[in-house]
Image (cartoon, rainbow, N blue to C red):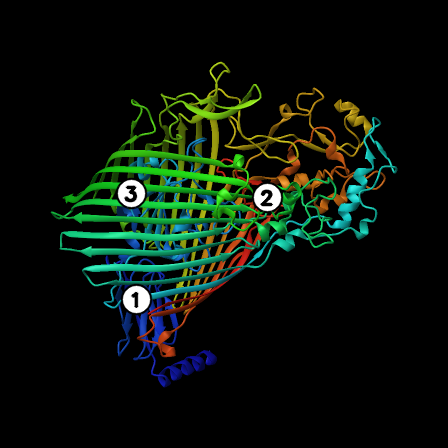
Amino acid sequence: MLKHKLLSALVLLASVAYGQQSVSGIVQDGDDFPLTGVYVTVEPAGTGTATGLDGEYEVMASPGDTLVFSFIGFSTQRVPVGNQTKIDVTLLENAQLIDEVVVVGYGVTKKRDLVSSVAQIKGDALENQPVSRLDQALQGRATGVSVTSNDGTPGSGTTIRIRGTNSVNGNNNPLFVIDGFIAGSDFDLNTLNVNDIASIEVLKDATALAIYGTRGASGVVLVTTKTGANLSTERPVVSINQYYTVQNVINQVELLTGEDYANYVNEAAQFVPGPDGFGVIDPSLPLIFDDPASAPSTDWLGIITQPGQIVNTDLSIRGNTGKTNYYVSMNRFDQEGVIKSSGFQRYALRTNLDFKISDKLTTGIRVNLSRTNRENNKVNYSQIVNSVLPTREVYTADGEYTAINPVSASVQRNPVADQELRVDNRYDNDLLANTYLQLEPITGLLLKTSFGAEISSYKRNFYLPGALPERLIDGAGGYASINTVQSNDLLNENTATYTFDVGNHGFNVLGGFSLQRNESEGFSANAERFPNDVVQFNNLSFGSDPSTYQLSSGYSRRTFVSYFARLNYSFSSKYLISLTGRRDGSSVFEDGNKYAFFPSVGVAWNVHSEPFLSESNVISRLKIRGSFGEVGEQGVPIYNSIARFNNVNAYFNETLVNGVLIGSLPSRNLTWETTQQLDLGFELGLWQDRIFIEADYYRKTTEDLLLNRDLPGTAGGSQLQNVGSIRNEGVEFALRSFNISSGDFTWETQLTVSANRNEVLDLGGDEFINLRQPTNQGGAGVRLIPGQPAPVFVGAIYLGTYKDQEAIVADGFEGRAFVGGPRYLDQDGNGVINDLDYVVIGNPQPDFYGGIRNTFNYQDFSLDIFFQGSYGNDGYNGVAQTGLFGRGDQTLLPGVVNRWQEGINETSDIPRAGASTSLFNPNNTLGIEDASFLRLKTVSLSYDLPVGNIGLDGVVRDLKLYVTGNNLFLITNWSFGDPEVSNYGSGLEQGVAAGEYPYSRSFTFGLNASF
């Protein structure tokens, strides 16, 4: 007891010594309800406490201190202590959080009034990211959005799927709308500077998509760029973002060394399969390598790769004079790839201007001008991984490039020569401009007209020098080609929006008209047998053999006309209804099928506004919503509704004659693919949205799939028809939580998890459709099969190796198989392994995918950690299969060291040397691997320098230093390379690896400053 009295006396004495006093009070909201968990911080000491169940608090503070009251969802208050001993505070809801604005088609809405399923990514989530494209920064950040990298090539794109795959021949890419301009689903995202983006909204359900009709079947991505509208200062703000990135190859394929390869090849060369199963080793057969230990061991992958680097500079100026707001930016992005002689550069200029002509009339313009240069990868990385032998050297004894496979003696490209001599450059210019005029004749009525255009050009210069070793051998001389494409996209849209209230009834009515025209014109020319490599593609007539000249050109035009309307109704902000309809017309269809109507309806209930929940201290937001509607897809190749012919050449009486052949018959009854979608979801906010949960269930079915149908030989060719259907069904879950918000320290978590199940319902009576024809020697078989996901991998079931002659006899392969050779399951028992034995062996669709982001802030430091991954998806690793079924003249993997060997390793399931030269060697289950992964995608640490403390106050507004690591580690069962990379780069052929441009790990050092 005495100790407690002494301790209390000491505390009181210390408080008096420092002039402190007890300050207490109650914290409540605007409705006089106490707030629990409000952080009360004493500044500058940094001490504090949190309010209890009744909103009460007590702290020790001096008269010169300030109490800071902070709580998620409410505006922070600062109260000087002075001589007060009791301070009661009322915190007001933060309108920016409660009434968060979300961009939707042809307008904006408050989050609380949103009926549809929309994922939002703020521009700050893309900060500190060393990426050239916005899609590369979207992975794992939005529910229902699957983003898969095609490969690691500088400037390469991704495959984006929103709620699964809808179409076979149509376009599965989402529609991109840039500042209101419908840029299409093939828009080149390289033209945009990621640092210019203010927000990204992903529209997913029918209510959100129906306003875009036939363009919205695969989802819509709305991109809004920065302006100066929200800038409060009268002085312009100049900002600079500069960063430098270093990159290194990760998960590089490990290939067999020269000595091990030589031993393998020698063993294969002397093995002769025999009828007794084991066959014989015939020592009289010549060896390929006399001394394997002295065989060359060239590290081709090490030679062609290097540390890559990125240098990026962003410079912008923005301001707001009241009558005019502006944002002007310049960007230079320069990436040197991790494979030598590959790279990507972008130069971009953006100007966003808005003018307030009068209180009722405003106008504005958005202009983005970009130039991108690509030095395309000149090396066939897949060839190195699969067939450039380690026993082949780069140069001959005379210092010339080698060109011969030392085992097969066939002519082969030299990767080093390719890097040093080939020329393959691509240049893209793009102008995207959109201007508008908006009039508000009466309060609530907005009349808007906009005109937009995208003018783009593409040129590729390609040259194969005659000095390349393989061309020197046959005296082919040089080969040059030029390809150009010019595209023009014009858009005019006119809308009227009227927002008004009648008592407790709120209305927002939208009506509009849209007209868009796309034109594209292409030209290509090539020539061969250049006598020297001086002029290259700059003078195609220099090709000495006119018979090799080839010219081609093409022109296409599409026109769209649309009428659309939307009615949003709310009663007391509790009950919400949204009705949408759009009538689209397209020039690609014949009369009678040109137009289609796409409607939707959505409803929502803000349960938290009901009396029985409005006084809850726990549930701050609860919304239940549902929608149903129909959208379309007009993924018809241009001119497909009319007959098309192909040029053919044939010999008549030993004379080459040009002619035409029917390519496809007219498809005059073609119509739109239609997708019906049901969406049910809820939003739940707890403790003033300190925890916010959003979940959705969806089910969508696409019918009238556009499929090519082979016609009888008497009819000739094929025909595109509306047959077949696909269904996608899934759930989405998003969580945002403010775990800690105490004084100088905050911790926020964002989690997204999505699961999609798709199924091919019908293919118009076809048993299957081969998307990728199954082939011998490791070619992936990719098919669409009714009742299966879209797509699946097919192949033979690999049973390991034959361990004895009895198994060969039992399988019916006596004389055609041998012990130590590959064994497959003969599905039909006919003694033949062929494509009739192919079954489903893998599914590239994950069970679920997502990401988790944790952001920690302490004083002026910020740490952002982002994980991304998928689970349950299979991949086809063609390199793994061919590298273990070595043909002898191909590259091998180290795993073949543990191959079946008589008397040495007779239990191995890796085939013996020479096994692939006998029997049928199909793609099989040995190539199927678990492609699930968890990737530490990004770790970013930043520090905001206190400019006032370093004498820069009044000159520098903000100054931030940051370091970012990308792809820091990967947890996966995938054997090598990256499980996310797709060799084919097609949405229906994902998950196939065959030796693509490798992924890299990067570290970025950057500076952000504004003045």
Disc 2 marks a residue whose amino acid type is Gly
Return the mark for residue 44.
none
Classify 309 as above or below 268: below
- Answer whether residue 504 is visible to the viewer in this image: no
Residue furthest to the right in view is: 284
Tag count? 3
- Residue at x 64% of width, y 55% of height: 303
- Within 10 Å of disc 2 (Cα), the crowding (few <14, some 14-19, many 20+) is many
Q: Which mark is nearer the camera, 2 or 1?
A: 2
Give how far apart the Cα atoms at labels 2 and 1 are: 57 Å
Question: In the rendered image, which residue does mark 3 sit on?
Answer: 105
Q: Is residue 166 left or right of residue 505?
A: right
Residue 22, horizontal then vertical, whole percent: 33, 76
Question: Does dot 1 land on a helix, a strand or a loop?
Answer: strand
Classify 165 as above or below 962: above
Q: Which mark is nearer the camera, 2 or 3?
A: 2
Disc 3 marks a residue whose amino acid type is Gly
Residue 441, horizontal then vertical, whole percent: 12, 47
- Answer whether residue 49 is visible to the viewer in this image: yes
- Residue at x 77% of width, y 26% of height: 816
Disc 1 marks a residue whose amino acid type is Val
Residue 514, horizontal then vertical, whole percent: 25, 38
Classify 823 as above or below 1005: above
- Residue at x 71% of width, y 43% of height: 405
Return the mark for residue 237.
1
User: Viewer-proximal residue, 631 or 664?
Assistant: 664
Question: In the rendered image, which residue does mark 2 sit on?
Answer: 477
